[in-house]
Image: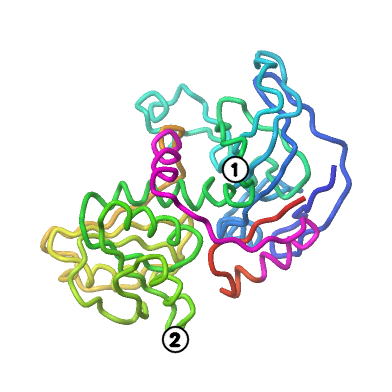
Amino acid sequence: MKAMVLERPGTALVCVERPDPVAGPGQIKVRIEACAVCRTDLHVIDGELEHPKLPLVPGHEIVGTIEAVGMNVDASCIGRRVGIPWLGHTCGTCPYCLSGAENLCDAPLFTGYTRDGGFATHTVADADFAFGLDPDGDPVALAPLLCAGLIGWRALAKASEGKRIGLYGFGAAAHIIAQICVWQGREVYAFTQPYDANAQRFALSLGAVWAGSSQEAPPAPLDAAIIFAPVGELVPAALRAVRKAGRVVCGGIHMTDIPSMPYAILWQERELVSVANLTRRDAETFFPVARAAGVRTHTKTYPLSAANEALADLRAGRLRGAAVLVP
């Protein structure tokens, strides 16, 4: 197999040849058709998330076909298309797992972080943590749903049922969740980097009722806001934008420090919450909604060997939608 490997945080990925991985008990071996590139991959590669498995194959928005299975896995699944997400394994015995909060497991494994992921031609995964996908779907279009979609969906659930939803950072996750919000009859307010007219036009094309700079106030108080950009300075801005009893959801795994802010912008029962990882239940609820809403992911494809270029484009904000590697 070929793989793009991180040997040390802060360095470029290296293309290597490896023996094909072998599916262990409870696992499947997957031939990868597409793997989207997530901002979390940047956090891992740039060293902002500590203690990755090294050397590491990044990538956790994987679409592929099962080629082989390990012990205790039904061989009839060979040939099926599956998606492999960020959450790759949980202990099943800690208080969080037993209470249905497996996203907070005390002993998890994460795809493309603490186990090898999808910047490769093949990978292995726990069969119980791989999701069945449409065999007739476009693997490139499906790939961003495996994290940008799932984390965005979990963040939207945390944002409650409000009508006016602000999305800070209009990238891979926001462009998916905006379509679902519009389908649900909500109003989307898109906040982008200052002077990013292309991102604002992109948001409006997907049904946003307003798009502007993250430094601007929306034309009406928001019921909730989701922050996808990893920028702590957006937290006080979002709190100022939501109404009394409004909620701000931080949707990223990493964020720069939140600056000191006056208590007055949190007062009047505004809430600030975070989202961590995902659960298999999130996938069960999200994929039917994405199909019903007719979500169309906007993607730019790169060959596997160009993973460093895709990461650079994401880091520089040159993408509209998601980058996807195709082996």
Q: Is residue 219 above or below residue 258?
A: below
Pick the residue in front: 166 or 117: 166
What segment is highlighted magenta in the picture?
283-312
What kind of element bears circle 1?
Answer: loop
Which disc number belongs to residue 77? Answer: none
Pointer 2 local density, CA inside 10 Å: few below 14, some 14–19, many at least 20? few
Who's the residue at 25% across and 55% down the image? 185
| Residue 140 location (% of width, % of height) | 63, 51
What kind of element bears circle 2?
Answer: loop
Amino acid type, mark 2: Tyr
Question: What is the number of callouts on the image?
Answer: 2
Who's the residue at 74% across and 26% down the image? 23
Left-right relation of 44 to 183: right
Amino acid type, mark 1: Gly
On the image, numbered disc 2 is attached to which residue?
195
Q: Is residue 233 above or below residue 279?
A: below
Quadrant assignment, res 204: bottom left
On the image, numbered disc 1 is attached to which residue?
137
Who's the residue at 69% across and 59% down the image? 9
Pick the residue in front: 15 or 291: 291
Q: Is residue 300 magenta?
A: yes
Disc 1 + disc 2, Cβ < 8 Å: no
Pick the residue in front: 204 or 89: 204
Eye-nearest disc, 1 or 2: 1
| Residue 30 location (% of width, % of height) | 72, 34
